[in-house]
Image (tube, rainbow, N blue to C red):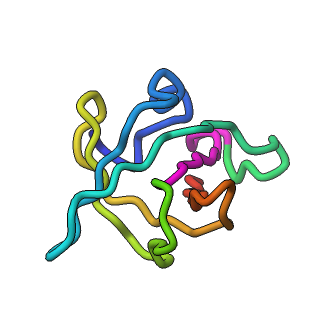
Amino acid sequence: MNLPQLTCADFAPHLHEAFRIRLEGREPIDLELIKAAELPAASRVQAAHRAPFSIEFLGPISDQYLQQHIYRLENPALGTLDIFLVPLGPVDGRMRYEAIFT
């Protein structure tokens, strides 16, 4: 899929699906998509561009977390996507990660 053309509606049907990250020298990490939401209209720059949105993931239960970075995520339906993830903080031992699309 073409990342600049993706919208919130492209991610919404894939809530609770796994997005796999493969890191060199480590076992693959599966992140669960838990949220896909459009951002408020005030944050829209131009009507010609897609509506800005955010997606959130939950990582596995672990005491090791991914750092803020661009990761290659794989999903059977959406394919391979390079997404900048930001850790938001843990919930019940699982780190939350967010990506914002403008």
Q: Position of residue 90 (x, y in %)?
A: 66, 63
Name the quadrant containing residue 102: bottom right
Single out the residue that lies furthest toward the right.
Answer: 42
Q: Identify the residue at horizontal 38%, vertical 70% (top origin).
A: 70
Q: Is residue 71 left or right of residue 80?
A: right
Where, quadrant-wise, is the N terminus in this rendering? top left
Image check: 52 left or right of 101? right
Write down the region rendered in magenta: 47-59
In the rendered structure, the answer to whether residue 102 lies left or right of residue 24 reads right
Residue at the outermost top position: 13
Residue 22, how many percent across, how many down? 22, 61
Q: Nearer the viewer, residue 10 or 98?
A: 98
- In the rendered image of this protein, does residue 3 appear above or below residue 1? below
Residue 63 percent across, percent down from the top left = 51, 72
Q: Does 11 appear above or below 25?
A: above
Question: Where does the image place residue 37, in percent across and percent down from the top left?
Answer: 67, 37
